[in-house]
Amino acid sequence: MNILILFLNAIFQLLFWLVIIAVLLSYFMDPYHPIRRAVDSVVEPMLAPIRRVVPLVGMLDFSPFILLLLIQLVRNILIRILIAL
């Protein structure tokens, strides 16, 4: 069971950092760069539903921040469920 918890924790940490990397790359890298396209191909499907619900505030997009919160929330819930088993 501990291995499963460690695996899930690693996956959620990877997702968390990919979102942060995607935000940083959006400031500095061309959208057609292969690295940015690879990161966006993982992150954008998770951001799209959030962007449909949460509007832009001026020029600010809060969807990555909400996704980071959701990743942490789901990770905590799943790990607590697995610990309780």
Image: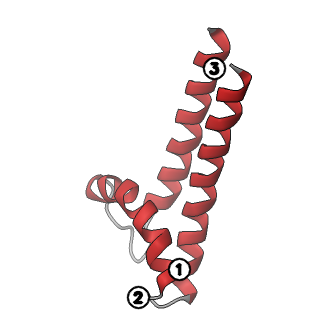
Of residues 59 and 17, the one nearer the viewer is: 17
Q: Tell me the quarter of the picture where residue 32 sits.
A: bottom left
30 to 46, vertically: above or below? below
Of the 4 image quadrants, the one containing the N terminus is top right
Q: 20 left or right of 49? A: right
Q: Position of residue 69 (x, y in %)?
A: 55, 46
- Pointer 3 residue: 80
The answer to whether mark 1 and mark 2 are in CB contact below 8 A is no
Residue of label 1 = 35
Relative to 71, residue 32 above or below: below
Please name the amino acid that badge 1 sits on. Answer: Ile
Give the CA distance from mark 2 to mark 3: 40 Å
Kindly identify the amino acid type of the residue bearing the numbered disc 3. Arg
Percent x, y of residue 51: 32, 59
Describe residue 26's horizontal placement relative to residue 56 as left or right: right
Q: Is the residue 71 above or below the residue 64 in the image?
A: above
Q: Nearer the viewer, mark 3 or mark 1?
A: 1
- Residues at marks 3 and 1, CA–CA distance in whole angstroms: 34 Å
Q: Secondary structure at mark 3?
A: helix
Whole-angstrom CA distance, mark 1 to mark 2, is 9 Å
Q: Which residue is mark 2?
A: 32
The dot on residue 57 is none
Q: Residue at x 58, y 62 (%)?
A: 18
- Of callouts 2 and 3, which one flags the residue occurring earlier in the amino acid sequence? 2
Image x and y of residue 74, in percent = 52, 34
Residue 73, by quadrant, is top right
Q: Residue at x 65, y 48 (%)?
A: 13
Q: Residues within 10 Å of mark 2 (few under 14, many from 20)?
A: few
Callout 3 touching callout 1 (CB < 8 Å)? no
